[in-house]
Each structure stands twice: as C-alpha cells, then as structure tokens.
Image (cartoon, coloured by chain):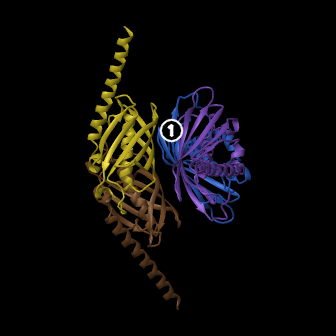
Chain colours: A yellow, B brown, C blue, D purple
Amino acid sequence: MPLSRMRKDSLDAMSQQEHDFRDRIRTSFGRQGAMALIGAELTRIQHGTVEIELSNRPELMQQHGFLHAGIIAAALDSACTYAAYTMIDPDVSILTIEFKVNLMSPGKGDRFLFRGEITKPGSNIIVADGRAYVIGDGPAKLIASMTGTKMALRGREDIQE
Amino acid sequence: MPLSRMRKDSLDAMSQQEHDFRDRIRTSFGRQGAMALIGAELTRIQHGTVEIELSNRPELMQQHGFLHAGIIAAALDSACTYAAYTMIDPDVSILTIEFKVNLMSPGKGDRFLFRGEITKPGSNIIVADGRAYVIGDGPAKLIASMTGTKMALRGREDIQE
Amino acid sequence: MPLSRMRKDSLDAMSQQEHDFRDRIRTSFGRQGAMALIGAELTRIQHGTVEIELSNRPELMQQHGFLHAGIIAAALDSACTYAAYTMIDPDVSILTIEFKVNLMSPGKGDRFLFRGEITKPGSNIIVADGRAYVIGDGPAKLIASMTGTKMALRGREDIQE
Amino acid sequence: MPLSRMRKDSLDAMSQQEHDFRDRIRTSFGRQGAMALIGAELTRIQHGTVEIELSNRPELMQQHGFLHAGIIAAALDSACTYAAYTMIDPDVSILTIEFKVNLMSPGKGDRFLFRGEITKPGSNIIVADGRAYVIGDGPAKLIASMTGTKMALRGREDIQE
C-alpha cells in the first residue's frame, strides 16, 4: 500500500473514531435529565477535552445569588466524564468514583463555561481535571476547579449508555 | 436568682438561639433557586446537623439512570453549609471554599437523605462532613460522602442571606 | 455437627482470619521504610480499623514547629491502607488512588494517634476515613481528617506485600 | 523622571521583592525538619512557582517499594505552600487548610520533581496546584497531582517563619 494511501486510511480511522465518540457523547448527554434540568449545552468535544456551557438563571443560584456550588459540580463532573469518553473503547462505560471542587470566585455572571480534560488516561482508572469560568465580553474568569477520578466499567449490563 | 430560674433562663436562651438559626436557615433555604429546582426539602435542623431530603425523578439523573453526582453534591453542600449556620453568629455568612465527594454506590432509589454535620467549628474556617443515603422501607444505604471547608464572612454587604 | 461445635469452628475461622491479616499487616508495615523513617508504630489492628502512633520530634515539623502536613498524610494514609487490608483476601494488594486531608488544628503535641477506618468495603474500590489526634493526659484533640480511595489489585506480581 | 529610569526602578523593585521572597523561602525551608528528614532540596523559586527535588532511597518507600504517598504529599504540600509565599507580603504567613492528592502512577525512579503553582492568589484564601514527576534521562513522567487550599495569616505571633 502506498504511503499516501496509508496516511489517508489512518486519517479516516481517526475521523471515524472521533465521529463515533462524538455521537456517543451527544446521545448520552441527551439522556442526562440533570443536564437538561439545568439547561447545560454541550459546546465542544475533542480528543481528551469536553466543554459544556450554561446560562445563568435564578433557579441555579444559591442563597447569595451566585451559581450554586452543586450546579458547578454537576456541569464540571459531566464535562470531565465525557472527556473520559473520548479516550475509551466504545464498549466501556465511565463512572465517577470521587471528585474535589475548589470554589475560587463567586459564580456571578450571565454565562459559564465548564471544561473537562483528561490528565491521566487509563484502562481502569482515569483522572480528569476541570475548570469553570464566567464568560462574556472580557477575558474568561476562573471560578472553580475540579479534580475527579473515574472508573472504566466493562460488561456491566446495568451500566449502559 | 434561684438555680431553677437560672436553668430556665439558660434553656430559654438556648431555645431562642435555636429558634433564630432555624428561622434564618429556613428563609435562606427558601431563597435557594437551586434547591427548589431539584425539589429538595429541609427536613431537620438542629445544633450542628442539618438534613435535606429529595425524591428521585428523571430530571435528576445522569446517563445511567442514577442520581447525578452533581445533584448529590448540591444537596450535600447545602446540608453542610446550613449545618455551619447552626453554629455561627447571626451576622456571619458562610461560603463554601471547597468540597470533596466520594460516590460509593449508585444513587438508585426513590428517596434520598443528605445529612451535613460540623466536624470542626471555627470563627474563620469550618469543616463539615456529609453523608448521602437512599432511604425507604429497609435500612438506609450509604451512597456518598462529602468533606467540605467553609469560610465565615463578616461585614460583607455583597454576601447576604 | 452440633450447634456448639459449629459456633466454635466459626470462631476459630474468625480467629485464624484475624490472625492472618494481623500477621500480614505487621510484616508489610515492617517493610515500609517511610513508616520507620518517621518513627511510626502500629498500635491497633482489628477488622475495619487500624491505628498508628507517633512521637513528635523536630525532624517531623514544618516551618512553624507543628507536625508537617505530609507526615500527617503519610501516617493517615498508612492507617487507612492497612484498615483496607483487614477486609480483603490474602492474595489481594491495596494501592491508594487518591486522598484528601483537612488540617483542622495545628499539630502541636508530644504524641499523635492516627486511626484509619473502612467506610465502604468493596472488591474493587474501597473508601476509608482517617482521623488524626494529639493524645496525652487530657482528651484527644482532633487535628486532621482524611478520606481516601483505595484500589484492590489481584495477580499483579510487581505489586506484592 | 525619564522613562528608562522608571523602568529600571521598577525592575529593581521587582528584583528586590524577588530577592526578599527567595531569602524568606530558603530560610523557612531550612527550618523544616521534615524536608531535611526526607532529603528534599529546593531547586527553583520564582513568582508563583516553587520546585522541590528528591532522590529516592529505601526510607522513603511504602511496602511495594514505591515512593510513599505521604512523602509525595509532604513534598507537594511544601512546594505549593512556598509557591504561595512568592505572592504574599513579608509579614504574612501561610497555613495549609486542606489538600487532595491523586496518585496516578507508581513512584518508581531515582529522582523526583515536585512543582507547586498558584492557581488563585488571594489576600485570605489561596489555591495552589502541584504536580509530581519521576525525572531522569527521558521525559518526566507524571506520578501525582495535588490541589491545596492555603490561608494567609496576619499578626499571629505563634505562627512565625
């Protein structure tokens, strides 16, 4: 096989794989009642990174009028979990074992971005880091970070996408 | 003053203080859009401990049909934060600095209980531990734990109950 | 077999199992260079709980003269890991995936106790909680807590006790 | 004042400030019994970042022959704490409130690097992230990460460098 053909096949395989995990993540995200409840949108999926965005509204606030820490945790956890889905085989599912969230600035703003990135891939345990930002006209402002540990599950019929 | 009278005054003071923080917590909880959004109910307030309960519904689930980790975090964080409110002066507000959540069993069930307890009170930094359970006919089943760090804020007009 | 005999057999089995994990933990602890370096002693082993004690000395301090947070983490992590060893089969090894430590009071004192307890046993993932105390003449004073996540490893020849 | 002069003054001020925090950190590090005990060396101090290196030896190992998680935590916590010292006033002290460590790969190797960086500076609460690597001939290998929360203390005579 000529080199140029090999390269193209390899690119096609990459595209196919990328196409597949995008499909899988979009479908799974669509089935998450919690993400629909808070109005989260999946805005970016690429190998190792997933982003979710959210518009603020009173139902997402805590008692001081800031975005509730639990909503921040929900969106960061989903972004980190789906980032893991970009790096696993199609028959594997991901469960969150634990996460830690640091709240650095009050979640004041109209729109928020949650980015999850894989720090350590693995066939069993995966570590992801997430960051939450207020976004708008100026530069993004960091409001929170997450480190989360995920477990890859195989052959569990009760845990399906 | 006779001893019996002193005891009664002391009890009245206790009751008054307890009455005050219960009022404050109920009012604050009622202003939390996020707690209303997920349908959380404040079911127990006592010195050092607050409990919140939640009935499951599809909007609170993640993609496998379990209670979403972020919803668990939201309810545990609120229970821990309000537990801190039972141990501070009325002019102090509480902000969560950070928390860690361990998810121990899938959140499968109809009703959940979230208990927050103060492990280390303080005038500046407060540490709370929370536990989440599936409750129903049988014994409660532990599904998650939280350790959270809170900061006491004084004289911040932007952070009000 | 008469009931009394069955009970005795069951007790003997329990004693044998308990004898076995005590032996295993003592041997493993003895091979931990780090525990010898800091002068830690294994003072209690029972099903689900392990305690380690430590006498303070200048080499264990941080810059303010308190017990170094890393020494606290080392002793708590060992106590939590060995607590997991009391609840697994003899051919399984335990690795720490992650832990979180809250430092609640300065580690000032002559002697410290570190208790690790299993909160959630499991064949794959185990969650342990630990607490560190200053001990002495009066009541023990809580100085730190840990929540740690452990993984059970089978058939890994590179990870042996 | 001519512009060139202003720039030079500003550079001198920067140098002076940098000189000051380097001195302070080196002196404080030298007083940490725990860092001497494990043989840690301070290898880099710059605004917002501190690095510590460590050579492996049997006394630093856990029972499987890897670098003990507590030693990793000790070195990462010191790197993160001193990174905070590069961003505070000279009369302020830093205490660690809490940290979380993820252990990603076994600590196998001859030499380790621990980098602490400030993610969120603050006059009261500071968040730092740390990463631990095996270093040697090839590329550095990530073995652990830390997120830690620090508190800035003013006017506490019992907490001095």
Q: Which residue is mark 1?
A: C151
In the image, C70: left or right of B12? right
Residue closest to the eye, B45 or B96: B96
Does residue B139 appear in this view?
no
Residue closest to the eye, D30 or A146: D30
**Quarter of the rendering occupied by the N terminus of chain A:** top left
Which corner quadrant of the image does residue D135 belong to? top right
Question: Which percent across, then down, holds residue D139?
Answer: 57, 28
Does residue B14 appear in this view?
yes
Crowdedness of circle 1 by 10 Å Cα count: few (<14), some, many (20+)? many
* Mark 1 belongs to chain: C
Residue closest to the eye, C86 or B45: B45
Q: Secondary structure at mark 1?
A: strand
Residue that extends furthest to the right in the rendered view of this protein: C58
Question: Which percent across, then down, holds residue A104?
Answer: 46, 53
Residue closest to the eye, A39 or D71: A39
Which corner quadrant of the image does residue C15 belong to? top right
**Kind of residue at disc 1:** Met
Which corner quadrant of the image does residue A156 belong to? top left
In the image, C18: left or right of A39? right
Residue that extends furthest to the bottom in the rendered view of this protein: B1
